Image (cartoon, grey):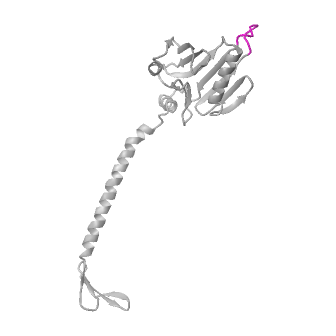
Amino acid sequence: MEFVSISNIGSIRILDVPLGVGCDYVKKVLRTFDLQENNNCLYLENVSIDNLPPINIHFNKDNDGCIDRIYIGQSQLSQKECDTLFKYFKKHLVGELNVLSDKEEEFELSNYLHRVCIGRQRGIGNDENKYPFFLHIAGRLMGKNEPELKYAMKQLYLERGVQPTNKPHTRISVSQTIKVLFLILMLIVAFLFALNGRYAPAGEQGAFMDKWTKILIVPNDGKYEKF
């Protein structure tokens, strides 16, 4: 399981969890983790992945119980740990998304599905040994009120699109095409078979009789005349 992955259509997954999925999906995918839940989100506390410093991961729920935002953060970090996290996510995301804002301590990124913010701070208050890090992934198309539009938007994050609907139609179209081609082939064969017995020799001058129309066809100066 990759910590961060991006599909060909731009859907970001954290621990194989994209936006738009329900809580049951998250619980199933992350069943090997100590996943906790409250009214607002599913979350992991102080998990270390890919040899990174321990971080907190929050999968925020919308009113329908689906994940509409992902937040990764940690405040109890040394400067080295904070820099390690910052460089890790910058490597995985900056080259894949459009850069809206590029500052030394914060990046804002975007594609047509997501808006992403990666940031770090230099100490909390007077304690310079605490370097917070945060990563916020929001869905630009989430939160639509119309049920059909809302459902369609979520399919993009799930990378489903309309392909499952089109596949049966494609199979039907291929089957029908094969039947039509076979029928055309049979008609051609039948026509050639009938055509083979249509004309019969008549006389010694290269003339022949069209049995279908009862017309005599006689060659004359390289042309054929009908009688």
What's the residue at 56%, 19% (across, down)?
A: 49
> Can you say whether 126 is above or below 183 in the image?
above
What quarter of the picture does the C terminus occupy? bottom left
Residue 43 screen position, x and y as percent: 53, 14
> Can you say whether 4 is above or below 47 in the image?
below
What's the residue at 54%, 14% (across, down)?
A: 44
Query: Which one is nearer the viewer's eye here, 31 or 81?
Result: 81
- Tell me: 103 left or right of 215: right
Query: Which one is nearer the viewer's eye here, 42 or 76?
Result: 76
Residue 209 screen position, x and y as percent: 25, 84
Residue 73 screen position, x and y as percent: 62, 16
Q: Residue furthest top?
A: 126
Q: Which secondary structure type mostly characterizes the magenta part of the structure? A: loop
> Can you say whether 140 is above or below 120 in the image?
below
Q: Is residue 168 visible?
A: yes
Q: Is residue 129 magenta?
A: yes
Q: Is residue 22 magenta?
A: no
- Magenta region: which residues? 122-130
Residue 225 position by quadrant: bottom left
Q: Residue furthest right?
A: 126
- Tell me: 100 left or right of 68: right
Residue 185 position by quadrant: bottom left
Residue 9 screen position, x and y as percent: 55, 36
Residue 129 position by quadrant: top right
- Tell me: 185 left or right of 13: left
